Image (tube, rainbow, N blue to C red):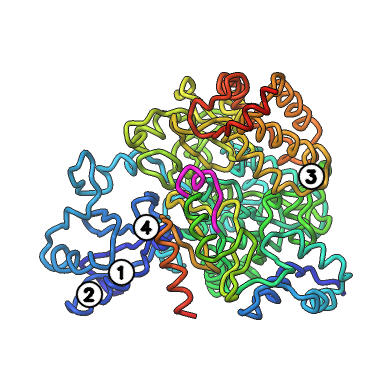
């Protein structure tokens, strides 16, 4: 019996391990078996959607918004500060394994641009100095 | 029921939370406890109040005083002054011409709106079905199920003239009639909550602020077409909307407003939540259907339209959040009431998210036919810092820029289409003279290149070619003939791309060429960016000359 919950199951598999929010080969195979579909189809889905990653990611995923309102605001300096602070480019994971830096095409938070999400938490009105504090706070909270 | 002396409504929408709303709320609750006022002042978490850039926001009733930009340290003053002594804290109140405004109805940003879809947003606790029911919630469903036949509902929707608020503007009643006529024992209903347009957050705000309104609209639609299973497809970037929807669905089931034999009738209907995973193209209806089926979100050719063959090959109605949220009011107050608002061809209201360089940004609902000037200058308070209005972008990456000379164009589907833009889902980004239109066009093409699903060649390759030309122009390497080439390719993609997203992808380029051709020419001929945004390095300029 085929199940149609490939995307839900991938979300769950990816979030199960809070230290490594990405999909390992075994995760995808499990989803394929559970849904009764070929592993190739699951891999195709996992690589189609930007919120799934088949490469290792850090404990927290930062999604910085790159929408036009953020672009008109000070998003560039915030991205620069994040890159400097984490020592990585977009797509990279900080050496301590805490953060992966990603982009989102729009988080829908234009009135408080520039904006980002760290995991499920929204942050708005960002400044270069402000993001350093936010990262530090998240790190301390563990 | 407990009676309170004061009600403190705190906005718990994503943007107010991101600005620190939760820490203000806990400071306020602490202070109320300290002063022994917890039995006199009720704190209510609501959905989006609209003026998102002034957040965190709080409205105190019965006076209707709006406090803005609240910090935890402000809680003490508000409690000891306003709540205890009845003296409003003017330094935290909304100001017009630097004078604090006593109540909401005196603030143009709020007073000039017409709220149908957002009628409960920011007014009720979004996590309480009782508050929704107390504001006439689920009475439209009861009316439809007990006083109307499914055909009556379809007729009412057709006479209301409601058009799809997702952007394309297809008449909702006709879509429902089409699906209702299909002879199939299984039909599906889908709510498209995959709001991905850059600059748009109307649907998220409705889902966060009044989820039952959407659920009620869906149940009425399901009754009209004969569906017993519905899906809400919401993007994973909206965790708060997902949480509030889960709560609302659970409550509706508990109250027998979803599930078997709703309100004692023979009608049964339930809704499942499906999460996206980050793909703009899934906002396209056939791509979204594939995604619900657990596949890659790639669109397919139409026809057949989903109303004939949709989810798992069954007749399916798919509408967006705002469309469903308009339904309960139409059923309750009648098509005539709805038609009195807006224009003849575009009745009703439209929700916009106002962003960019405008004094007050946020969520607004206005009657169709309103002009862009009224939205930006009367409601939004104009352009800040003495800057000049240059253009407003509607429809995101599928839309175009409306320039100064068309500021008095009425906002409706046809007028925006005639200007080479689209209504879109409601993102409205205002730009002043500091924005370069070629840079804006490039920005959107970059977005399309990233988000193109890759299935059809015109979109996959064509947008990439257009992006390269725009990159050249904005870096001083533009060549004579580039503008014509962009126009030709744009037309070609519009005619040949597989889905609506591909077909509309060239719009931002074509629209900016149409109204700001001189800016393109200045980049190419004079190697100058009139807005001063594009930086041309000397080496590149030389290369361009050579």
Q: CA distance from mark 2 to mark 1?
A: 10 Å
Local crowd at mark 2 within 10 Å, few (<14), some, or many (≥20)? many
Task: Answer yes or no: are tags 3 and 4 on the same subunit.
Answer: yes
Please say whether residue B402 is one of the residues in the magenta stretch: no
How far across and down, in percent of the image, does residue B284 sit?
A: 71, 47
Q: Is residue B119 or residue A47 the one in the foreground? A: A47
Disc number for residue B123: 4
For label 3, the residue is: B305
Between disc 2 and disc 1, the foreground one is 2
Q: CA distance from mark 2 to mark 4?
A: 21 Å
For residue A90, which quarter of the picture? Answer: bottom right
Left of B486 or right of it: where is B368? left
Q: Chain of mark 1?
A: B
Q: Chain of mark 2?
A: B
Q: Nearer the viewer, mark 4 or mark 1?
A: 1
Task: Quickly name the residue at label 1.
Answer: B43
Q: Is residue A65 magenta?
A: yes
Label 3, residues with CA under 10 Å away: few <14, some 14-19, many ≥20: some
What stretch of residues is rendered in magenta? A64-74
Query: SS class of the residue under badge 3?
Result: loop
Q: CA distance from mark 3 to mark 4?
A: 38 Å
Q: Earlier in the sequence, mark 3 or mark 1?
A: 1
């Amino acid at each position: 019996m085929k199940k149609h919950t490939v995307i839900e199951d991938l979300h769950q598999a990816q979030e199960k391990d809070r230290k490594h929010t990405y999909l390992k080969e075994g995760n995808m195979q499990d989803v394929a078996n559970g849904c009764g579909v070929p592993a190739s189809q699951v891999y195709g889905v996992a690589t189609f959607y930007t919120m799934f990653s088949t490469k290792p990611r850090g404990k927290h995923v930062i999604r910085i918004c790159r929408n036009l309102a953020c672009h008109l605001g000070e998003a560039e300096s915030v991205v620069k500060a994040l890159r400097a602070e984490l020592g990585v480019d977009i797509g990279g994971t900080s050496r301590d394994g805490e953060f992966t830096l990603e982009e989102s095409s729009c988080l829908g938070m234009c009135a408080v641009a520039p904006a980002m999400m760290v995991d499920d938490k929204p942050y708005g009105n960002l400044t270069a100095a402000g993001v350093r504090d936010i990262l530090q706070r998240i790190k301390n909270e563990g | 029921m407990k009676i309170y002396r004061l009600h403190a409504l705190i906005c718990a929408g994503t943007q107010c939370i991101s600005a620190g709303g939760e820490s203000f709320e806990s400071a306020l609750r602490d202070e109320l406890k300290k002063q022994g006022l917890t039995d006199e002042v009720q704190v209510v978490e609501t959905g989006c109040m609209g003026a998102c850039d002034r957040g965190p926001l709080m409205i105190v009733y019965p006076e209707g005083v709006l406090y803005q930009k609240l910090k935890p340290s402000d809680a003490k003053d508000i409690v000891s002054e306003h709540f205890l002594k009845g003296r409003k804290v003017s330094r935290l109140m909304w100001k017009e011409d630097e004078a604090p405004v006593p109540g909401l109805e005196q603030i143009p940003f709020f007073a000039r709106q017409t709220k149908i879809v957002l009628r409960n947003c920011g007014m009720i606790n979004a996590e309480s079905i009782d508050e929704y029911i107390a504001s006439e919630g689920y009475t439209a469903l009861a009316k439809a199920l007990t006083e109307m036949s499914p055909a009556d509902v379809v007729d009412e929707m057709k006479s209301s003239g409601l058009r799809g608020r997702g952007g394309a503007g297809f008449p909702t009643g006709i879509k429902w009639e089409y699906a209702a006529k299909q002879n199939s024992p299984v039909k599906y209903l889908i709510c498209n909550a995959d709001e991905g347009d850059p600059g748009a957050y109307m649907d998220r705000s409705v889902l966060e602020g009044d989820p039952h309104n959407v659920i009620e609209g869906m149940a009425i639609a399901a009754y009209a077409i004969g569906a017993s299973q519905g899906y809400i497809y919401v993007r994973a970037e909206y965790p708060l909307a997902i949480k509030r929807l889960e709560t609302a669905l659970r409550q509706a089931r508990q109250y027998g407003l979803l599930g078997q034999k709703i309100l004692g009738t023979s009608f049964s209907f339930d809704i499942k939540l499906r999460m996206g995973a980050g793909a703009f193209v899934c906002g396209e209806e056939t791509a979204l259907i594939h995604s619900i089926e657990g596949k890659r979100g790639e669109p397919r050719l139409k026809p057949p339209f989903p109303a004939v063959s949709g989810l798992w090959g069954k007749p399916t109605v798919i509408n967006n959040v705002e469309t469903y949220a308009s339904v309960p009011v139409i059923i309750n107050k009648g098509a005539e009431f709805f038609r009195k608002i807006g224009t003849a061809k575009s009745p009703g209201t439209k929700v916009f998210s106002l962003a960019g360089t405008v004094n007050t940004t946020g969520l607004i609902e206005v009657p169709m036919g309103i002009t862009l000037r009224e939205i930006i200058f009367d409601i939004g308070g104009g352009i800040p810092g003495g800057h000049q209005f240059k253009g407003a972008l509607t429809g995101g990456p599928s839309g175009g820029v409306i320039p100064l000379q068309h500021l008095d164009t009425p906002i409706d589907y046809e007028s925006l289409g005639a200007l080479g833009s689209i209504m879109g889902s409601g993102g409205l980004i205002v730009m002043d003279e500091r924005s370069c239109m070629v840079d804006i066009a490039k920005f959107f093409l970059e977005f399309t290149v990233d988000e193109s699903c890759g299935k059809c060649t015109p979109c996959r390759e064509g947008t990439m070619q257009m992006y390269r030309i725009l990159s050249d122009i904005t870096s001083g390497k533009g060549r004579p003939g580039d503008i014509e080439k962009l126009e030709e390719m744009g037309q070609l993609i519009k005619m040949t791309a597989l889905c609506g997203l591909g077909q509309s992808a060239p719009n931002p380029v074509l629209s900016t060429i149409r109204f700001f051709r001189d800016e393109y020419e200045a980049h190419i001929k004079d190697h100058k960016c009139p807005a001063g945004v594009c930086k041309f390095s000397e080496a590149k300029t030389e290369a361009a000359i050579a």
